[in-house]
Image (cartoon, helix red, strand yellow):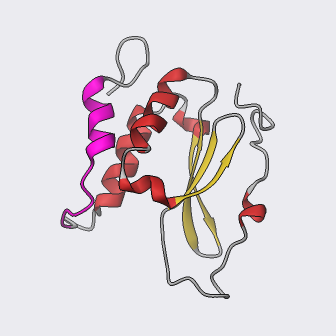
Amino acid sequence: MLDADGYPDEKSLKHIEKFDFDQPTIDGVTPMDVYLNLIEDNWWAADWGFRIIKIRGRRFLELSCGGWSGNEEIIESMKKNIFWYRLKVKRIGGHYLFEIDSPKLDEKNYINPKDLTELCEHCNGWGIV
């Protein structure tokens, strides 16, 4: 939940940090879906800085902080969660790419991180909009 100034509140940051992925899927909603919604609900300028994209049939979460310190607070909370190990690319300017779907890694499924480093179309890699 965002406060009056557009920053994530402490309760939300703790929830992101301590989120437990060992929960059952309920009515088709997975723990991953819940976690992604939690991040999106707290992300400033989520309309351009929070995107789920598909590459070779796999989903990735692309986050761009846009120079907003509230988004950096979310990143700091994410670093304390097991989800952080899904990080595939981190670029200067507050850009992050996480793999949501993790199939068996083999040559067919391999995605070279160099293929994922295009600059953000909104800030050209600077991280400030």
Left or right of 121 in this view: 81: left
In the foreground, 85 or 57: 85
> In x, y percent, where is residue 44?
50, 28
> In x, y percent, where is residue 37?
37, 46
Q: Quadrant of the C terminus?
A: top right
Left or right of 103 in this view: 108: right
Residue bounds of the magenta highlight: 10-24
Q: Is residue 17 above or below residue 20?
A: above
Residue sitting at 63 percent across and 29 percent down? 66
Q: Quadrant of the N terminus?
A: top left
Residue 123 lies in the magenta-colored region: no
> In x, y percent, where is residue 52?
55, 55
Left or right of 10 in this view: 64: right
Q: Main SS type for the magenta part?
A: helix
Q: Quadrant of residue 116?
A: bottom right
> In x, y percent, where is residue 19?
27, 48
In the foreground, 82 or 58: 82
Residue sitting at 79 percent across and 52 percent down? 118
Q: Is residue 110 above or below residue 78?
A: below
